[in-house]
Image (cartoon, helix red, strand yellow):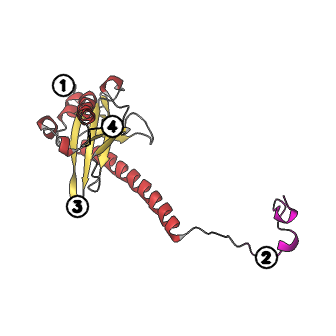
């Protein structure tokens, strides 16, 4: 390395007292892309957090204690107990916003045969200026439904006749709903019965 470009001991030689000019600076478009990416990630995190708080609020409104788990817990997001603390259940929360046209996204490894110790899943649909909608499932039932939807999708060839490829994730959307899904709307009875030990 030439001595005048070695800045490990400060600026030396003919560069003393001169300003360093960056050639090829970050364009406004690149800066905007970085800001958009950060904003998108933040928005996604806040949507998920909002859904978890809504689930806690609804369970508390129904007369139960509900607490958020520490962030990045891979299994569940909410722990709910009855008022005397003798019974508890864990709940995984999946949240989508009105702007989300793809439904609730899931890891492709999510399948009934790999059910962790999570009894329930609550799907939260955030709506602009309206209360959120909740769909409550037992974990195994929910994963069975998502598996059915994926198998139906992957079994149908593309329009050109080619087989479909695994997209690397699973999804669930109102367009996939059947009657057994619709009756789950705002129906908290599965969790209530578990907390009251009626199941």
Residue at 24%, 60% in the rendered image: 128
Point out the tag, 4 or 1, that comes first from the N-terminus: 4
Q: Secondary structure at mark 2?
A: loop
Q: Which callout, 3 or 1, points at the residue further toward the start of the chain?
A: 3
- Residue 99 appears in which quarter of the rendering? bottom left
Q: Mark 2 or mark 3, which has the lower sequence index?
A: 2
Find the magenta span and give its range.
1-20
Circle 4 is placed at which residue position? 92
Q: Residue 143, percent across and down? A: 28, 31
Q: Secondary structure at mark 4?
A: strand
Q: Which mark is residue 198?
A: 1
Q: Give residue 89's mark.
A: none
| Residue at 88% from the left image edge and 70% from the top image edge | 13
Which quarter shows the N terminus?
bottom right
Nearer the observer, 56 or 98 = 98
Callout 3 touching callout 1 (CB < 8 Å):
no
Residue at 31% of width from left, 30% of height from top? 88
* Residue at which label 3 appears: 129
- Mark 4 vs mark 1, CA separation in Å: 21 Å
Badge 3 or badge 4: first in the primary sequence: 4
The answer to which of 62 and 93 lies nearer the viewer is: 93
Q: Earlier in the sequence, mark 1 or mark 2?
A: 2
Residue 99 painted magenta: no
Q: Position of residue 103 (x, y in %)?
A: 27, 46
Tell me if residue 4 can be seen: yes
Check disc 2 and report the residue beneath it: 18
């Amino acid at each position: 390395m030439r001595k005048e470009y070695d800045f490990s001991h400060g600026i030396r030689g003919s560069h003393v007292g001169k300003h360093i000019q960056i050639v090829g600076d970050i364009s406004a478009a690149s800066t905007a892309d970085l800001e958009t990416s950060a904003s998108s990630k933040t928005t996604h995190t806040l949507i998920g957090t909002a859904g978890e708080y809504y689930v806690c609020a609804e369970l508390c409104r129904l007369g139960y204690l509900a607490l958020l788990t520490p962030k990045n817990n891979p299994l569940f997001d909410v722990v709910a107990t009855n008022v005397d603390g003798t019974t508890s259940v864990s709940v995984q929360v999946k949240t989508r916003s009105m702007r989300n046209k793809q439904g609730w996204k899931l890891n492709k490894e999510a399948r009934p045969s790999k059910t962790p110790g999570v009894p329930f899943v609550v799907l939260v649909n955030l709506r602009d200026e309206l209360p959120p909608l909740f769909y409550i499932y037992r974990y195994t039932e929910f994963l069975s439904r998502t598996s059915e939807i994926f198998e139906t999708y992957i079994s149908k060839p593309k329009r050109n006749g080619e087989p479909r490829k695994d997209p690397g994730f699973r999804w669930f959307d109102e367009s996939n709903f059947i009657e057994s899904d619709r009756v789950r709307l705002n129906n908290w009875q599965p969790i209530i019965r578990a907390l009251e030990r009626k199941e």
